[in-house]
Structures are given as C-alpha cells and as structure tokens.
Amino acid sequence: MQRAHRDAEFTEFYVARVRALRRVAYVVTRDWHAAEDVTQRALVKVYRAWSRIDGTGLEAYARRAVVNESLTWVRRRPRDVVVGSLPDVPAAEPVAPLDLDAALATLPAQQRAVIALRFVDDRSVAETAAALGLAEGTVKSHTAKAIATLRRHVPSLTDTKRTP
C-alpha cells in the first residue's frame, strides 16, 4: 500500500472515529486530558499496524487499543497529589447526592471499560467481550455489578416513575 493512500485512509478513519474513541477513553480514565493522550497513543499504534489490520476489524482493533491504553493509564497514574501545606479546616461534607461522574469513579477500571463500551459506544456483549479479551459471561457480570453500584450511588437511576 502506498504511503499517501494509507495516510488518506487513516485520516478518514481518524476524523470519523476519534471523538467516539475519546469518549470511551474518558469513561475509563475519568480525565479529559488523559483521554486525549491515551486516544492519541492508541491511534499511533493503529497507524503503525494499519497495513496489517483487516478492514472489517479496523474499528474493533482501534477500540481495543484505546481501552487497553486507558486501562494502562489507570494502573500507572500517580495516586498521590503533593500539596504545599495541609488545610487548616477539614473539607466540608458534600450536601448534594453523588453525580454520575463521581459514581463512575467508584467503579473499578475494568467495569468502567465495560460500561464505556456497552453504553457509551453502544456495543453488544459479544463486541465488548472481543474488544476487552474477556468472556461474554464476564462482561455480563461486570455490567450487572457496575449498574448495581451506580444505582446505589445515584438513586435517580432507579426512578421507576415514567411520564407517558
């Protein structure tokens, strides 16, 4: 494949999919800057492997690359933040119920990845399992556990009242 042709195909793919891939990365990393970084790193890997990737599996390959990069970032990110001095007063207790972003933070990274692919990227159980290299039963289990956790932290998700 000629380089100019490959570059044109990759550019077309990039323009069409980068926003969706970045959204998936954000749900896993919970940080827009990190999501941008891991998406870019993953797409560099996709570009390098472009000639070896089957056209029908291109999107799945890119999605898996983004999820893997996101999970790596979650495992390796610094956990502690160094501050110059400690505050004199304790932090105030939150008065409002947890929002969805804070509830997502309570999920382990693997469950966030499953939620991102299943509900943000609208993938089936089989597609999610293939993208993450998991069994379909594991995807279903992670989904059920994640939804149960989210419902505990965001009670409005379980509101059964519907307007006609």
Image (tube, rainbow, N blue to C red):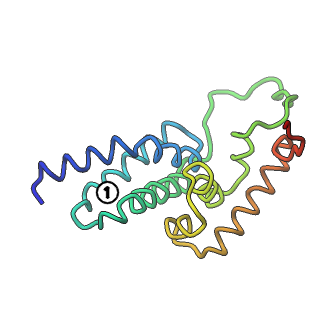
Foreground residue among 30 and 76 = 30
Which element carries disc 1, helix, strand or loop? helix
The quarter of the image holding the N terminus is bottom left
Indicate whether 22 appears above or below 112.
above
The image quadrant of residue 161 is top right
Location of residue 50 with respect to 136 vertically, above or below = above
Residue at point 38% right, 53% down? 42
| Residue at x 58%, y 50% (from the top left corner) | 28
**x, y percent for residue 82:** 60, 36
Q: Is the C terminus in the top left, top right, bottom left or bottom right quadrant? A: top right
Classify residue 31 as left or right of residue 85: left
> Which residue lies under the disc numbered 1?
45
Is disc 1 surrounded by few (<14), some (14 to 19) or many (20+) residues within 10 Å? some
Q: Quadrant of residue 98?
A: top right
Question: Relative to residue 49, is residue 106 drawn left or right?
Answer: right
Callout 1 amino acid = Lys
Position of residue 94 measured from the top left corner of the image (x, y, whole percent)? 84, 30
Image point 34% across, 40% down: which residue? Answer: 15
In this view, 94 is above or below 27: above
Q: In the image, is 148 to the left or to the right of 26?
A: right
Q: Position of residue 24 (x, y in %)?
A: 53, 48
